[in-house]
Amino acid sequence: DAGITQSPRHKVTETGTPVTLRCHQTENHRYMYWYRQDPGHGLRLIHYSYGVKDTDKGEVSDGYSVSRSKTEDFLLTLESATSSQTSVYFCAISGTGGPGGYTFGSGTRLTVV
Amino acid sequence: DQQVKQNSPSLSVQEGRISILNCDYTNSMFDYFLWYKKYPAEGPTFLISISSIKDKNEDGRFTVFLNKSAKHLSLHIVPSQPGDSAVYFCAAYSGAGSYQLTFGKGTKLSVIP
């Protein structure tokens, strides 16, 4: 979707290194989310944000941190990457925080070796 | 504890026939349900939704049925087309919760020409 961009699209990193994934939106939406998708697990929420500098943990937040210093950017950081964090990461945005209107980015495929 | 369950990892259907994808949930606080469709290397896209006050919602070839007493919903696609081949995620939302969507593990639908 043109209103939401994830970068990088692909990344290979070594165990123990820090990694930051970026989600950028041009929709001025208040709510932003980070999900990971793994085989056999579907989509699981990592962290979400309900405004600038307002964030909260999701279902699988251990090992991840987030920051949102401006409306358009939501960063996901793996402080010290582990092989269990190899996954596809999706960012989503929502204007209302309600059930509808989630728009997902195209994803970042992260491989930790 | 998996609150949204899609027990069929995959489904194969002949083109032109009906596809039925099933989803069960355990949390009685869920009051809105959605289906997302995902193609490889893309983010999930919204397909159809239903509020808990309804038992059916229709949009073109797609119909979602909700049975609250059984905590079960299903997505019907009629007629199925090869372009419908994708992974389908069931998701649920609680208005009394923390504005998060809870996803099932997904069902991979293959429509055979």
Image (spheres, coloured by chain):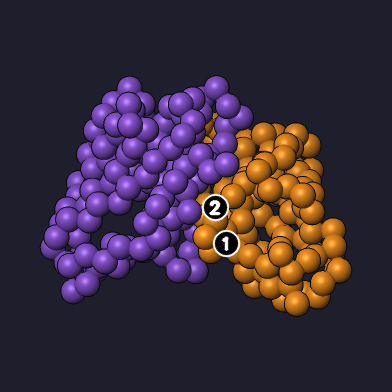
Chain colours: A orange, B purple
In the image, residue B113 sits, relative to residue A27, either above or below, namely below
Amino acid found under the numbered disc labelled 2: Leu
Q: Identify the mark at residue A38; answer none if there is no mark.
A: 1
Mark 1 or mark 2, earlier in chain: 1
Residue B31 % position (x, y): 43, 27
Amino acid found under the numbered disc labelled 1: Asp
Residue B59 visible in the displayed image: no
Q: Are marks 1 and 2 on the same chain?
A: yes
Residue B15 % position (x, y): 17, 67
Disc 1 element: strand
In the image, residue A9 sits, relative to residue A46, either above or below, namely below
In the image, residue A91 sits, relative to residue B68, either above or below, namely below
Residue B19 % position (x, y): 22, 56
Chain letter for the residue marked with disc 1 in the picture: A
Classed neighbour count for the residue bearing mark 1: other residues with Cα under 10 Å, few (<14), some (14–19), many (≥20):
some
Quarter location, residue A38:
bottom right
Left or right of A7 on screen, residue B103:
left
Quarter location, residue A17:
bottom right
Chain letter for the residue marked with disc 2 in the picture: A
Residue bearing mark 2: A43
Left or right of A36 on screen, residue B62:
left
Q: Identify the mark at residue A29; answer none if there is no mark.
A: none
Q: Nearer the viewer, residue B46 or B98?
A: B98
Identify the residue at horizontal 75%, vertical 34% (top origin).
A54
